[in-house]
Amino acid sequence: MFPASVYENRRKALASQFENGLLLFPGNVESPMNFADNCHPFRQDSTFLYYFGLDQPDLVAVIDCESGTATIFGDELTIDHIVWMGDLPTLVERAEGAGIADTRPAAGLAGVVGKVAGAGGKVRYLPPYRAETSLLLSELTGLAPSALKGSADEEFIWAVVNQRSIKSEEEITELDEAVAISVEMHDAGIRMARPGMREAEIAAEVTRIALARGGRLSFPVIATIHGEILHNHDYGHTLSEGDLFLLDTGAETARGYAGDLSSTFPVSESFTDRQKTIYELQVLAQQTAVEALGPGVPFRDVHFAASAVIFDGLKDLGIMKGDTAEALEAGAHAMVLPCGTGHMMGLDVHDMENLGEVYVGYGGKPKSTQFGLKSLRLARELETGFVVTVEPGIYFVPQLMDLWKAQKHCEEFINFDELDKWRDFGGVRNEEDYLVTSDGARRLGPAKPMSVAEIEERRGG
Ligand code: GLY
């Protein structure tokens, strides 16, 4: 945990935005894999972690906005817990670490909430994303679980999004550490791949490093020779000479802060000319996006700057054609970039996505419904203190090629016969993480291997 004053100050800043009522923060509970005592690793809710720092299940926190006091509802460990898990700090001791003197049994929560609601006070909560949280809120409010997302408090959402979007010094230190571990994971993955190895072996090694450095993964590893599949969690393929390998993985620090990097490298010792051409085009697009970062710049513009570089490069190869601005307006680049160029990052790898992409990534403005652009998670103007990923990719998705060709979709901008020659190519993505600063942006953590020379040196080529 951070020092108690960090949590006290965060709560004070939040509570000062509300005159009265309660702010409700349900922490997460254990999540069984196949039976109650065999659980997924526990992950606390990130907003709970941000304001209270306590990384244990079965806690609910409440802030009374009028008095500014915070209370933790939860039950002390019994001898059964201690026999099972060892001698652990009491809830009272843990809460003290977050600057909270008021802890009460879990059973007391309903009475406190009911009293405020009964007197006409507002009980505010954020949109739930876990079934157990929905059930708890449903019991407390009397609303059906299906009604809860729609009744989440918008002022509360905005207050949390605005506060968590601007990373403080202690958070930036954590994020630098998360990215440094992530770079170590990528360096190891790039060096170890050999023909005959299974994808799972690389996934296992990067997972080992994340755990060995005291944290864990910030999301399930993507380690694949099918980089054109954006979120592939299958590690069943065997690597062969000539394959391109895409590794997308990041560490989470013990305090819960995420890193998120992607690398692409040849399974052979060096890139083929064809691979190098697309690889260098992706690196150019990524660097163009990085150079565009800065306060006041809409991330949508960053996305389109990278997309234009990719479109122009593919035009030079005869794959795309026509006016670049018109093609981008029509969404033709989504043939090879059917997703966004980045997202916010912090306590969540996609920071605060549970609170709503429209708030976090769009400042309340509507999202596009166009294929490709609808998957851009971040479009709003950047501010100093935001942390974002930068990850434009180039993906050759055979099913998408066939569909658009059959539909003649964007045929004025795509030479489908030329495109078809790349149908077995796969995908390329390099991804880094950046802090937006008053005069541009700073890369978080050390540099990961990126240039063709840096990659080939690690591959032994
Ligand atoms: N890098 C994985 C993700 O953004 O979901």
Image (cartoon, helix red, strand yellow):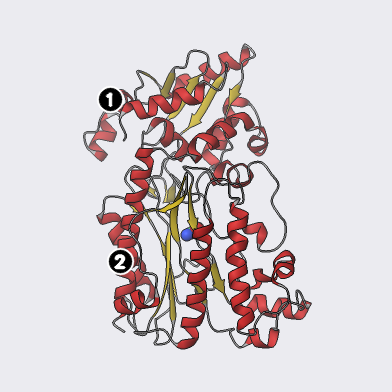
Vertical position of residue 345 compared to residue 391: above or below: above
Q: Which residue is mark 2?
A: 205
Q: Quadrant of the C terminus?
A: bottom left
**Residue visible at 70% across and 83% down?**
415
Q: Secondary structure at mark 2?
A: helix
User: Is any atom of residue 65 visible in this view?
Assistant: yes
Q: Quadrant of the N terminus?
A: top left
Q: Quadrant of residue 235?
A: bottom left
Vertical position of residue 151 compared to residue 269: above or below: above
Residue 165 x %, y %? 50, 40
Residue 284 x %, y %? 50, 70
CA gap, disc 1 and disc 2? 37 Å
Q: Amino acid at mark 1?
A: Glu
**Residue visible at 38% across and 53% down?**
444
Q: Residue furthest front?
A: 439
Q: Which residue is mark 1?
A: 93
In the picture, the disc for residue 369 is none
Mark 1 nearby-residue class (10 Å; few <14, some 14–19, many ≥20)? some
Given contact means CB atoms under 8 Å apart, are the residues at marks 1 and 2 in contact? no
